[in-house]
Image (cartoon, grey):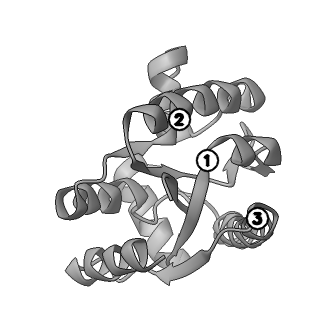
Amino acid sequence: MNGTIFIAGAYGTGKSTLCSKLTQKTNIPSFSAGDLISDINGEMYGANKAVVDKNNNQILLARRVRELNAQNSNILLAGHFCIFNATNQVELLPESVFFELNIMQIILLEASSNQIFEHLKKRDGKDYSQSTIDELVLQERLQAEKISVKLKCPLSIYRMTFSDADVEIIGEIVYGG
C-alpha cells in the first residue's frame, strides 16, 4: 500500500532528525509538516512554536501531502497530533486533517520529559514547565491512539534512545508495518 508513514511525537523527540536518517537508510523521502506549512504560508515557527491559524495550516499541509503522495510511492512525514498555542497550552489539531494525509502507518516517538526539556532548551533556548511537557506527551499519545483507530491503521509507539539503534528499529517497523 502506498501512502504516508506518519512519524509523530511531542516537540523535541527527534522526529525530523530520525526521518532524515531513515531517508538515507530506506530511500523513502521525508518531510517535516511544519516545514511544508512554512514553505507555503511563510510563517517561521522557531522557538515560540506558536501557530497563528492551525486550521488553515492543516488545509495547506493536506494539499501539499497529496501532491507529494502523487509523486512518491511512500513518504515519511514528521508531525504532531497537538501543538502549543501562544500561551503554551496544548491544543489538538483538527482530526479531519489526518483523514486527508493518506496515513497508512503511525509511529509515535516518545522520550522522557527530562530529555524533551533538555532538547528544547538546547534547540530553542526556551524553558518549558514539566507539567506543560507532560501534558503535551500525554495528549500526543491519546490522539495517536484515537486517530489510529479511526483510520484503521497500525500504531507503533517507540521510546527514543537517541542512538543509532533508533534508526534500525524504526526502519524495521516501517518495513514490517
Q: Secondary structure at mark 1?
A: loop
Tell me if mark 3 has few (under 14), some (14-19) or many (20+) residues whose alpha carbon lies within 10 angstroms of its own. Answer: some
Q: Earlier in the sequence, mark 1 or mark 3?
A: 1
Q: Earlier in the sequence, mark 2 or mark 3?
A: 2
Mark 1 and mark 3: span between their CA atoms? 17 Å
Judge by depth and name the residue closer to the eye, 151 or 123. Answer: 151
> Residue 35's image quarter?
top left
Residue 130 coordinates in the image, percent (x, y): 64, 71
Amino acid bearing label 1:
Asn
Q: How many marks?
A: 3
Tell me which residue sits at (60%, 54%) in the image: 103
Q: Are marks 2 and 3 in contact (CB under 8 Å)?
A: no
Provide the residue designation for mark 1: 102
Whether residue 44 can be seen here: no
Q: Secondary structure at mark 2?
A: helix
Mark on residue 65? 2
Residue 116 coordinates in the image, percent (x, y): 48, 68
Tell me which residue sits at (47%, 38%) in the image: 69
Provide the residue designation for mark 3: 143
Q: Is residue 92 above or below residue 14?
A: above
Tell me which residue sits at (30%, 53%) in the image: 28
Q: Earlier in the sequence, mark 2 or mark 1?
A: 2
Residue 15 coordinates in the image, percent (x, y): 42, 59
